[in-house]
Amino acid sequence: MDKVAQLQQWVKESRNIVFFGGAGVSTESGIPDFRSVDGLYQQKYAYPPETILSHSFFMAKPEEFYRFYRDKMLYLQAKPNAAHLKLAELEACGRLKAVITQNIDGLHQAAGSKKVLELHGSVLRNYCQKCGKFYEVQAILQSQGIPRCACGGIIKPDVVLYEESLDEAVLEEAMRCIAQADMLMIGGTSLAVYPAAGLIYGYHGRRLVLINRDPTPHDQKADLLIPGKIGEILSQIKTA
């Protein structure tokens, strides 16, 4: 059977699908992948992106952090693509129970997905480190230098920086969803960033689907391996 036809059959038969995705889901919306050849990691800055996007750098050099962050991390013009829209459609018809994402762009929610577990947070949420007041992303865009709260505290994006831990409640819920899934669909992720990549070990079913443009360290675990772009593959799936 053709691989996409096999995926279609499994989707039709499943009632508890969980999707786990990474940067490759958003590249088709024009958001660059950190680890691709033409991604942020290949560009030249005063400091490597891994350094700038770390907790210690944010604390030591917040102005430099925000110069990079505003320039390279906010893609608010991006729109949901075929992958986001199909996943929202699968949820609406009752087959998909959760989207677990490493992305911080909010595009799954923009597409209409309701149950979205953001492992690495979201650029759309920002908080004062001193008083905890919430700020929309526009507050970051419209500010100069270091964005500050009315109380004087520095505003920090609600994203998980390097050296920071994932939110325990989000991680636990992601693990619970995966353990209960009758089908786990993984797409657009290198499965190289831990602890997120370790979530694959929590699935013990027989319908592990891996859709990715490039090979991953876990390809041999897949019950169905489909090379390609996640949006192009999912757009062929019918939910009716």
Image (spheres, rainbow, N blue to C red):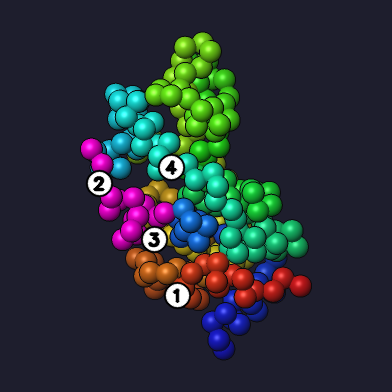
The spot of residue 4 in percent (x, y) is: 57, 80
* Residue 207 seen: no
Instruction: Using the image, tell me which numbered label, if any, was put on residue 44.
Output: 2
Q: Is label 3 or label 2 in front?
A: 2
The spot of residue 59 in percent (x, y) is: 33, 24
Query: Label 1 near label 2: C-beta < 8 Å?
Result: no
Task: Please name the residue shown 46% across and 53% down the image.
Answer: 31
Residue 62 is drawn in which quadrant? top left
Residue 151, above or below 211:
above
Query: Label 2 near label 4: C-beta < 8 Å?
Result: no
- Amino acid under label 4? Met
Instruction: Using the image, tell me which numbered label, if any, was put on residue 190.
Output: 3
Please tell me whether mark 3 sits on a helix, a strand or a loop: loop
Please tell me whether mark 4 sits on a helix, a strand or a loop: loop
- Amino acid under label 1? Pro
Q: Write the start and end of the magenta stretch as one range.
A: 32-46
The residue singled out by tag 1 in the image is 227
Looking at the image, is mark 2 or mark 1 earlier in the sequence?
2
- Image quarter hosting the N terminus: bottom right
The spot of residue 154 in percent (x, y) is: 44, 19
Please tell me whether mark 1 sits on a helix, a strand or a loop: strand
Q: Is label 2 or label 1 in front?
A: 2
Task: Please name the residue shown 60% across and 64% down the image.
Answer: 82
Q: Is label 1 or label 4 in front?
A: 4
Looking at the image, is mark 3 or mark 2 earlier in the sequence?
2
Task: Please name the residue shown 46% across and 73% down the image.
Answer: 228
Kindly report the distance in space between the C-alpha atoms of the residues bearing marks 4 and 3: 19 Å
The residue singled out by tag 4 in the image is 73
